[in-house]
């Protein structure tokens, strides 16, 4: 699946198909914790930002940002093919490339999000050398990813027009590791109410439950994979997702992985000593 490259004026010709091999020693700038946390001051729910960034995409994206057939299931994969394999060192290596038309500071934000995942799990994003299966991170139209390892060159779109932020990058990378959105997990009806009257009929498939393996982890309102209250609403401000029994519970954060997000990645990939650790910001 490939969409037209996001356009912007940079004083040079952008080439989304020219790949940057990560590991360039000239990239020194990394975002500070304060810059990452400054996202909390953005009044727009970032799930709304993802959907806004994707509104011009003509192809169907499942649940707004996932490029995969509707029949495919996350976390229940035939012979574990959709999981990334473990290396001899027992870490899970995910090779990647980054397109050359990202600025160095944008590449740094992308690699910082990768490092954040690696610091809390056994996932290791590694610069691609000659691996057949790898993530190709590109400045295309919108923010989207396939779910799990799909084989070969696997595009992850992070448009510079709204997608290159720490939380959105983590969100799309976690899709690529094999996870759907929290609001579609199999036991969701005990924790949220889907307000079907506020959802256009053409968007209703985005709220269908999946037959997920929840890995014996609790439903997580604070998951970085949980969409916000008004996702896909037919009318601005109308709630499509309401937490129950307490409707005031916050959902849809896009700052950083939650503790349960971390636990799930470690369980799915059998990360051993990482599984029992709890991390606090």
Image: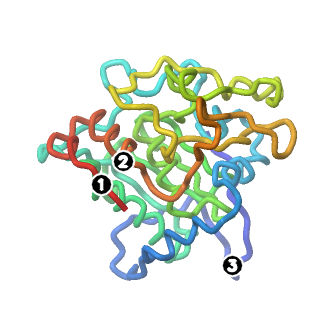
Mark earlier in primary sequence (3, 1): 3
Mark 3 and mark 2 residues within 8 Å of each other at the beta carbon = no
The mark found on residue 10 in the picture is 3
Q: Position of residue 140 (x, y in %)?
A: 64, 55
Q: CA distance from mark 3 to mark 2?
A: 39 Å
For the C terminus, the image quarter is bottom left
Tell me the SS state at disc 3: loop
Q: Earlier in the sequence, mark 1 or mark 2?
A: 2
Front residue of 202 and 27? 202
- Kindly identify which residue carries mark 2: 259
Q: What colouring style does the render use?
A: rainbow
Judge from the rendering whether residue 67 lies leftward or rightward of residue 114; answer left or right: right
Q: Residue 96 appears at what percent x and percent y?
A: 39, 54
Q: Residue furthest right?
A: 235
> Closer to the camera, 23 or 187?
187
Nearer the camera: disc 3 or disc 1: 1
Identify the residue at horizontal 38%, vertical 66% (top origin): 22
Element assignment for label 2:
helix
Name the residue rendered at 61%, 41% in the picture: 227
Number of residue marks:
3
Q: Is residue 12 above or below residue 112?
A: below
Which residue was labeled with disc 1?
Answer: 279
Where in the figure is residue 249, as x and y percent of width and height?
A: 58, 43
| 125 shown above or below 147 | below
Give the quadrant of residue 254. bottom right
C-beta proximity under 8 Å, tags 1 and 2? yes
Which label belongs to residue 95?
Answer: none
Which quarter shows the N terminus? top right
Residue 118 pos. (x, y %): 30, 55
- What crowding class fits label 3: few (fewer than 14 Cα within 10 Å), some (14-19), or many (20 or more)? few
Residue 231 placement: quadrant? top right
């Amino acid at each position: 699946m490939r969409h037209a490259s996001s356009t912007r004026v940079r004083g040079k010709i952008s080439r989304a198909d020219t790949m940057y091999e990560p590991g360039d020693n000239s990239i020194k700038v990394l975002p500070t914790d304060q810059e990452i946390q400054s996202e909390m001051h953005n009044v727009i729910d970032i799930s709304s930002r993802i959907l806004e960034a994707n509104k011009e995409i003509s192809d169907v994206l499942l649940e707004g940002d996932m490029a995969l057939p509707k029949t495919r299931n996350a976390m229940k994969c035939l012979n574990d093919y959709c999981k990334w394999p473990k290396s001899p060192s027992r870490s899970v290596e995910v090779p990647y490339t980054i397109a050359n038309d990202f600025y160095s500071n944008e590449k740094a934000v992308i690699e910082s999000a990768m490092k954040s995942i690696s610091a809390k799990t056994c996932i290791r994003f590694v610069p691609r050398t000659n691996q057949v299966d790898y993530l190709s991170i590109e400045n295309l139209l919108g923010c989207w990813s396939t779910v799990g390892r799909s084989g070969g060159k696997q595009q992850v779109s992070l448009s510079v027009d709204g997608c290159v932020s720490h939380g959105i990058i983590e969100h799309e990378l976690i899709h690529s590791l094999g996870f759907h959105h929290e609001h579609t997990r199999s036991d969701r009806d005990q924790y949220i109410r889907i307000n079907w009257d506020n959802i256009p009929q053409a968007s209703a498939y985005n709220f269908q439950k999946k037959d997920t393996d929840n890995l014996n982890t609790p439903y997580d309102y604070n998951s970085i994979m949980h969409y916000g209250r008004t996702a896909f609403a037919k009318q601005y401000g109308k709630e499509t997702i309401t937490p129950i029994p307490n409707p005031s519970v916050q959902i849809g954060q896009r700052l950083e992985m939650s503790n349960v997000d971390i636990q799930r990645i470690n369980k799915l990939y059998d990360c051993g000593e990482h599984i029992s650790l709890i991390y606090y910001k």
